[in-house]
Image (spheres, rainbow, N blue to C red):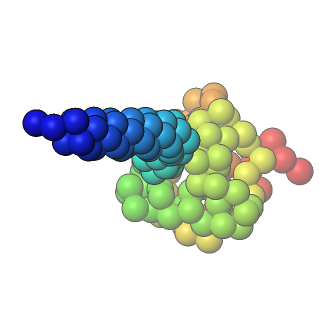
Amino acid sequence: MGDTDRTDLAARLRLVDSLLTAATDMMSSLQRVLAEVHNELGPARREEEERPRDAEIAELRREVCQLREGMASRAVIERAKGVLMRGHGVGEAEAFALLSDLSQRSHRKVRDVAADLLDGASGLPPVAARPTSVPAGRPPDGAGGDAAGRALVTAANGAEPAGRS
């Protein structure tokens, strides 16, 4: 090989070396840009992925609260129906109809009317449904829910409850 060939080869090698250096610098720059993009988009993407889960969890929590409230309300209503059924000889449907009618007339929830009945509230407003009679074999004892139940049934029959003027 002659001196010109070597000079030409050396020039080409320097050119290739400078091209490789430029390509390496460009790759480094691209990697830094990609890393910055990932750093910027990563939290936003994770936040976007978590957002539907947060909404779903919030909805499930609301549903659990509603179900718990419904279970508690049902227990109170069932107990109040039982007081009316046992104490005044009405059927389950009639007992619920009494509670429901009173609820509508007083613009209160059935569970609140039922709770008042169980707590012994005697100033219950009249209701439309009329039970046929109070069983003769079970005298009223005048305490708690029975008194409120008698007031409810008496009001339904159109008479003044005992103790009211």
Residue 90 position (above or below residue 74)? below
Evaluate whether residue 46 shows in this view: no
Residue occupying the point 78% across, 47% down: 123
Residue 131 horizontal side relative to residue 158, left or right: left
The answer to whether 85 is drawn above or below residue 104 in the figure is above
Residue 100 rendering spot, x and y as whole percentages: 56, 62
Q: In which quarter of the image is residue 25?
A: top left
Q: Which residue occupies 24% across, 42% down?
A: 4
| Front-most of residues 159 and 36 | 36
Q: Is residue 23 left or right of residue 111?
A: left
Q: Residue 61: x and y, percent?
A: 49, 40
Q: Which residue lies furthest to the bottom in this view?
A: 128
Residue at x-position 52% and y-position 39%: 36
Residue 53, by quadrant, is: top left
Would you say residue 116 is visible in this rendering? yes
Where residue 162 appears, as percent x and y from the top left, is: 75, 45
Q: Nearer the viewer, residue 5 or 21?
A: 5
The residue shown at (74%, 61%) is 106
